[in-house]
Amino acid sequence: MRFLFCSVSAHGHVLPLVPLMEAARSEGHDVALIGSGGMADVVRAELPVGVEYLPAGPMPFELAVEAARRTGGDVMAPSAEGVGEIFGGIVLERAADDAVAAARSWRADVVISEVYCTVGPFVAAVLGLTWHEVRMTTAMPAEWVQAIDRATARHYDERGLSPVAASSVLDLWPAKLRDPVGDLPANVPVLPVRTRAHRRPRGAGPSSVPAFGDRLRPRVLVTLGTVFSDTGLLDSVVDAVAGNDVDVLATLGLSLQGGAGVGRDREGAGGGSVKFVSFVPIDELLDEVDLVVGVGGAGTTLAALSRGIPLVLWPQGADQPAIAERVSAAGAALTVGALSEIGPAVAEALTATTYWKSAGDVAQSIADTPAPPEVIRLLASGAQR
């Protein structure tokens, strides 16, 4: 069977799909991924061997700039209307034709599309294919859903088509973190899928992770993800964490790599070492880490929790506030609202065992979820009926 994956062209959207792609390949299926041509070289090393990359459309930042121009909003903090254009209107305007042509030429049988990607459902509607939605985060705000639906409607209308509902939702978001009010669709089958920290394909070789020597103090991983990568912000967060008696490993977002003055190893005010590392799969960074400090991106958050590691979260935008709220409600994270709160929060998280216990409970919840190969087998058997 030929599984076509579709994703917004950003690490936080692509990488959660990798275990499903890997499972499909291990089950003997053909796999391709549709994404921006500008993402091809960056993401190729992260994909399982044998996955084909089919370029279509521009990078998200280009979409955000155009959406801000059309709506008068902020590039980094778009309004609901801007979100609709970024993930619905403009991306289909600029990517749909190439994506449909690529999918048709590749002879896709089934489409698997992550929740923020409207290209996958559109391709499925045009080609008459079954599609499945992957969710790796909290429920999208209702005003975003409505704005995206409005922005995509004109593209369906132009082709005389109607949107086709997903055949199922592949849910990577752990049961322990779900909103008790209910954040899953009632009319679509939901298939829980085990998530994991991202790792590179077998045979890729280990990355270069700085060594700290003897374990004399707790180790804290600081990561702002790949989007909210600001030089001043990263340095400020690192210094706030390093005011404690800890060793700090800090990751450079993709936009900061090679930046002047960024990534300077030093001694922290609390006496520990501070070391920086360029982009490395987070699975390799979590070894011997006692706490993760981040902004609440879904990929980093789920990676840490899959290992039973608690977090301190300072949300900066997008879906991060909602993610931080759910993880804190589960007792596995402390959420702060200001830079000045980070240092004390780190101290509390490292000394209060309740955060470790709650993070361990979430990790067990994840471990009890069906593995990706089980889910792929289920999809394949359903498609063959």
Image (spheres, grey):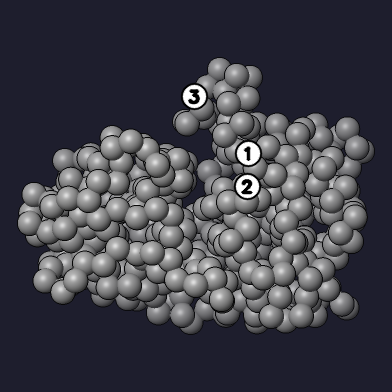
Can residue 158 be seen in the rendering of this structure?
yes
Task: Give the secondary structure at mark 2.
Answer: helix
Q: Residues within 10 Å of mark 2 (few under 14, many from 20)?
A: some
Q: In the image, what residue type sits under mark 1? A: Met
Question: Residue 236's x, y, as percent?
Answer: 22, 40
Q: Give the mark nearest the N terminus, 3 or 2.
A: 2
Q: Quadrant for residue 171, please give it.
A: bottom right
Q: Residues within 10 Å of mark 1 (few under 14, many from 20)?
A: some
Kindly state the secondary structure of the residue where label 3 is placed: loop
Q: Quadrant of residue 48?
A: bottom right
Of residues 349 and 281, the one nearer the viewer is: 281
Using the numbered discs, state the Cα–Cα distance from disc 3 to disc 2 in whole angstroms.
23 Å
Q: How far is mark 1 from mark 3, CA to CA?
A: 17 Å
Residue drawn at 33 percent across, 36 percent down:
260
**Closer mark to the observer between disc 1 and disc 3:** 1
- The residue at 63%/58% (across/down) is 44
At label 2, which amino acid type do we have? Met
User: In what quadrant of the picture does the C terminus appear?
Assistant: bottom right
Residue identifier under label 3: 74
Q: In this orientation, does residue 147 appear?
A: no
Q: Is residue 214 left or right of residue 366?
A: left
